[in-house]
Every structure is written in C-alpha cells, then in structure tokens.
Image (cartoon, rainbow, N blue to C red):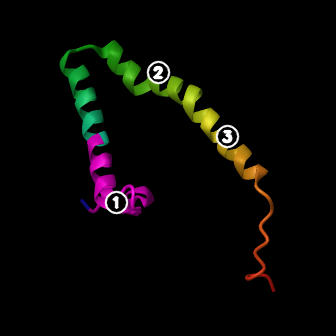
Amino acid sequence: MRSVTKGFWTNRSTPTLPRISRLFLYLGYVLFTVTLINWTLTSHDLERLGMFTGNLADVGFGRFGKPLLYAVLAATLALPPSTDTEHSE
C-alpha cells in the first residue's frame, strides 16, 4: 500500500474526497486497467489490445490531453502578477 500513496494526489485529503477514498479510486483504476488488458490478451484480440495500449491513448491525448494542457497554460498566463511582498527583500 505504501507504493500507492507515494503520489501527491493520493496523499492529499479534502472534505469532499478523503485520503482513503482517493486510494480506493486509484486502486480501482489500476484494477480496471489490468482487467481490461488481461481480457484482451485472453480473447487473443491483439488488434484491440494494440488499440487500448497505443492508438487509443494517442487519440485520447490529442483530443483531451493537449486541449487541457493548453487551457492550463492559458489560465496560468492570464493570472495577474503576484503581489506577495512578504518574501521580497
């Protein structure tokens, strides 16, 4: 269980999503992924396995990942400059 909690996301705890819920969510995601890959290997559907492990991941990154990265970059650049004078000398 220690290797699961090394990530920043799983160690954080908020009132709406406590730490134990984050751990179970992460473990569920991992188990679902392992089950999906195992099922495709067992059914000998290597074309679909290639889709899940390669092509589909690229399409998902292109359609969802890149726009999210661009949105985060644009939101970060649109923030006003920090006026934190506590640390200035």
* Residue closer to the observer: 45 or 86: 86
Mark 3 → mark 1, Cα distance in angstroms: 27 Å
Residue at left offset 79%, top offset 59%:
80
Task: State the residue position of label 1.
Answer: 18
Residue at left offset 61%, top offset 38%:
68
x and y, in percent, of residue 38 in the image: 22, 28
Q: Magenta part mainly helix, strand or loop?
A: helix
- Whether residue 10 is situated above or below residue 37 in the rendered picture: below
20 with respect to 10 (left or right): left
Query: Which callout, 2 or 1, points to the residue nearer the camera?
Result: 1
x and y, in percent, of residue 21 in the image: 30, 54
Which region is colored magenta? 2-28
Tag 3 and tag 2, C-beta contact below 8 Å: no
Residue at left offset 56%, top offset 30%:
64
Q: Is residue 42 magenta?
A: no
Query: Which callout, 3 or 1, points to the residue nearer the camera?
Result: 1
Callout 1, which amino acid?
Answer: Pro
Mark 2 → mark 1, Cα distance in angstroms: 34 Å
Question: Which type of secondary structure does the marked residue at label 1 adopt?
Answer: loop
Task: State the residue position of label 2.
Answer: 55
What number is the disc on residue 71? 3
86 with respect to 14 (left or right): right
- Whether residue 22 is situated above or below residue 85 in the rendered picture: above
Callout 2, which amino acid?
Answer: Asn
Q: Is residue 5 magenta?
A: yes
77 with respect to 19 (left or right): right
What number is the disc on residue 42? none
